[in-house]
Amino acid sequence: MTSTNAQSRAPLYWLALGSFAVGTESFMIAAILPDIAADLSVSEQAAGQLVSVFALTYAISSPVLTALTGAVSRRLLLIATMIAFVAANVVAAAAGSYGGLMAARVLLAIAAGLFVPNANALAGVLVPPSERGRALSIVTSGLSLAIVFGVPLGAIVGDTLGWRMTFGGVAALSVVAAAGLLVGLPQAIGASAPVVGLGARWQALRTPAVRRPLAVTTLWAMGPFTVYPYLASYLQRVTGLEGAAVGFALFAWGLSAFIGLAVGGRLTDRLGGARIVALTLPLIVLALASLSLTAELLPPALALLPAFAGIIAWGFGAWAFYPGQQARLIGIVGPQHAPIILSVNASFHYFGFSVGAALGSLVLSIGSVRELGWVGALCVALACLLEFAPARERRLANAPAE
């Protein structure tokens, strides 16, 4: 790689660091949710609404605010957004009540929902078209690496220093990212970056062929996020694992998710997006169901390895699905509309995260963590029904009349 190429790619790594901070904050709450509930004197299901509200705010605010800020300098917007992300983490760390922490999570979601799509849009115009895929993968790697390393690190920090320090740590990381963006992004950078308006996003939803896949995205997101916010509680009650040891489980989940993304991307190129979606959805159903089956049948002394196996299969399948789904949607609308449909798909999957977290809270209010896997599996099973229904309809239509 030449010195010029290295220099032109340098801003991508600052964008990736910002994505790493956003991803760490977004997913780490699963490790510290029981501590938050205990410290703020609320139930775990109430604490789980911190996840649901974050995801719902992200899903609604991201497309609206991204469109409304289209005329703002990309450099200024990204720096300001990361500074706002720092401030919101400080508010979260200092929150003395459940309401204060909820308000902080809303602010964090707004900042995250502005940063991530604009960072991806900027990455797409910083390099020649022939290098666009690599540029996007560099920025996206910040989110995937956060799943692998940031989340379990947050679990360890939360266990040793308290849950507030996890938000403090993300705030410090975000300060570094903001400083890097300030120094590393040239003044005129991204002047030609396209911004997708609300009208274009609405038009994408009016395309009949994308409605069923977007519903599949929503159900795919609902299933795992019925379980994920309460994973620490599940491990504690089903396997006896608690404290920093939960970080190892989250590391296993994150590493399998990272591998799933990589393998899913490669197999999508070879087999096609629709095939990958069809292969991964049933795997997710089995993985989530196995968590409840383990909880029902095995004592804690024997449940650890089966629970880890289910978590690893879930992480791999859920994230291997994602590149296949993205490729399938691009194939439906065409490459020229890829930014629009991927943006819409992101809103749908965050909406699914929100509904899933709320559904998990409802399950805990009337049952226990043992039932979370069954309910999550049911959501993804419904996604399977939607996914496989067209093929069944075609077979019935082509069957010879008796």
Image: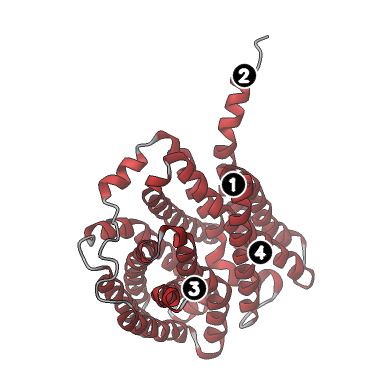
Label located before the other in sequence (3 or 4): 3
- Do tag 2 and tag 1 residues touch (Cβ < 8 Å)? no
- Under circle 3, the secondary element is helix
Tell me which numbered mark, 3 or 1, is placed earlier along the sequence.
3
Instruction: Point out the residue furthest to the right here.
Output: 302
Instruction: Label 1: state its secondary structure.
Output: helix
Disc 1: which residue:
277
Dot 4 surroundings within 10 Å: few (below 14), some, or many (20 or more)?
A: many
Q: Which residue is mark 2?
A: 398
Whole-number angstrom distance, CA of label 3 to CA of label 4:
17 Å
Q: Amino acid at mark 1?
A: Val
Would residue 179 be visible to someone looking at this image? yes
Q: Nearer the viewer, residue 44 or 27?
A: 27
Give the percent coordinates (x, y) of residue 23.
46, 71
The Cα atoms of the two marked residues, 2 and 4, are separated by 40 Å
Q: Residue at x 38, y 46 (%)?
A: 336
Q: Secondary structure at mark 2?
A: helix
Amino acid type at mark 3: Ile
Numbered badge on residue 311: 4
The label shown at residue 29 is 3
Q: Quadrant of the C terminus?
A: top right
Q: Nearer the viewer, mark 4 or mark 1?
A: 1
